[in-house]
Image: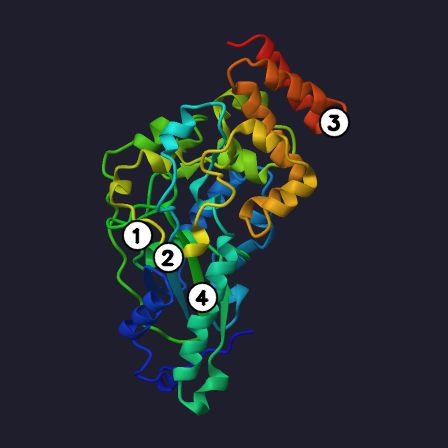
Amino acid sequence: MIVPMSNDHITPLITSETLNRWALELGFQQLGVSDIELGEAENKLAQWLKNKFHGDMEWMQRHGDKRSRPALLEPGTLSIISVRMNYRPPQSYDPAMILNHPERAYISRYALGRDYHKVMRKRLQTLAKRIEQTLEEKQQDAFKYRVFVDSAPVMEKPIAAKAGLGWVGKHSNILNQEAGSWFFLGEIYTNLPLEPSTPVSNHCGDCAACIDICPTQAIVEPYVLDARRCISYLTIEHKGSIPLEFREAIGNRIYGCDDCQLVCPWNRFAQTAQEADFAIRNQLDSVQLLTLFAWSEDEFLKKMEGSPIRRIGYERWQRNLVIALGNAPPSPIIKQALIEKHHSSSELLQEHIEWALQRQNNPT
């Protein structure tokens, strides 16, 4: 539980300029502060859940109003510190090239390196400790906080928009005029009554590039994403069989999808990651599908240690690869690999392998 602090307990040392300087020193590219009023976002979330756009992600509604009312999640919260950190790898194969080579695996750019949760959380904890150490001794016990990085019921995107880090784009990601959208978000809920930052205006205009490019038409209207149709959801969050209607559209995307970001005009200004932990691992930016398909479960767990990909588990990893192999150009080597894997696979994988073999034998 967070006990609120009054303005009388805030030292002049905790200013916006100070917070921004510390954030930059810790490797964040921007910091902003918001209040805890999320009424508009709460209404939009309620309608989104009512439409069942969250699919299997039942946790999206499990916590009730705690997601949109920060003081319910952490009583005493008065302010939210929001930060962003770039993740686009500085040296990687052109994503468009990989998407146009169906024998290779496309993995979302955010997952090519180390798990961002660990990196961001550690830095945010350090930032909070600096605040704590800067406060006068008598105030230290009164300062309370909680760090979040894509964890717990936190509406990170509306919070980031209120904190001035950007605006919510039509694809539902945060967009920044100077940095595009290739960045992670993190938050500190605190009982400090900090001065809120100024939000920025929306600059999407009439552009509909992200809506038009989506392979599965998951952006059902501007600013509204039906997760049940989204390739990122299907390949990462969805645990069961991938619906037949989406398999061909998935192409060679085996973990996530970046199409709406790749086409966004604002990403002409995107900045590359400065964080060494986000460097590409295991050549995942241009690896052959068959190379990944040949990994045993032990190899998968070992090679993906410290990677965000590891959390989907071996079965979903193989399921996604099977779909991509089914979408690849017909090949005797691919068919043989699928046949050999079939007898030792789970019922879920067998069903996808049979589909992939049909595709290989009867390409459209």
Instruction: Kindly indicate the quadrant of the structure image that contains residue 234.
Output: top right
Circle 2: residue type = Arg
Q: Which colour scheme is used?
A: rainbow
Mark nearest the camera among 4 and 3 is 4
Q: Is mark 1 on a helix, strand or loop?
A: loop
Q: Which of 46 and 159 is in front in this view?
A: 159
**Tag 2–tag 1 contact (CB < 8 Å):** yes
Q: Name the residue under label 2.
A: 84
Q: Is residue 363 left or right of residue 188?
A: right
Residue found 41% across the figure and 36% down from its top: 258
Mark nearest the camera among 4 and 1 is 4
Q: Is residue 336 left or right of residue 53?
A: right
Residue 294 seen anywhere in this rendered image of the structure: yes
Q: Name the residue under label 3.
A: 347
Instruction: Kindly indicate the quadrant of the structure image that contains residue 186.
Output: bottom left
Mark nearest the camera among 1 and 3 is 3
Q: Nearer the viewer, residue 351 or 97?
A: 97
Q: What's the mark number on residue 166?
A: 1
**Tag 4–tag 2 contact (CB < 8 Å):** no
**282 versus 211 height, above or below:** below
Q: Is mark 3 on a helix, strand or loop?
A: helix
Q: Distance between the residues labelled 4 and 2?
A: 11 Å
Q: What's the mark number on residue 123?
A: 4
- Label 1: how many Cα within 10 Å (few below 14, some 14–19, many 20+): many
Mark nearest the camera among 4 and 2 is 4
Circle 3: residue type = Glu
- Label 3: how many Cα within 10 Å (few below 14, some 14–19, many 20+): few
**194 versus 198 height, above or below:** below
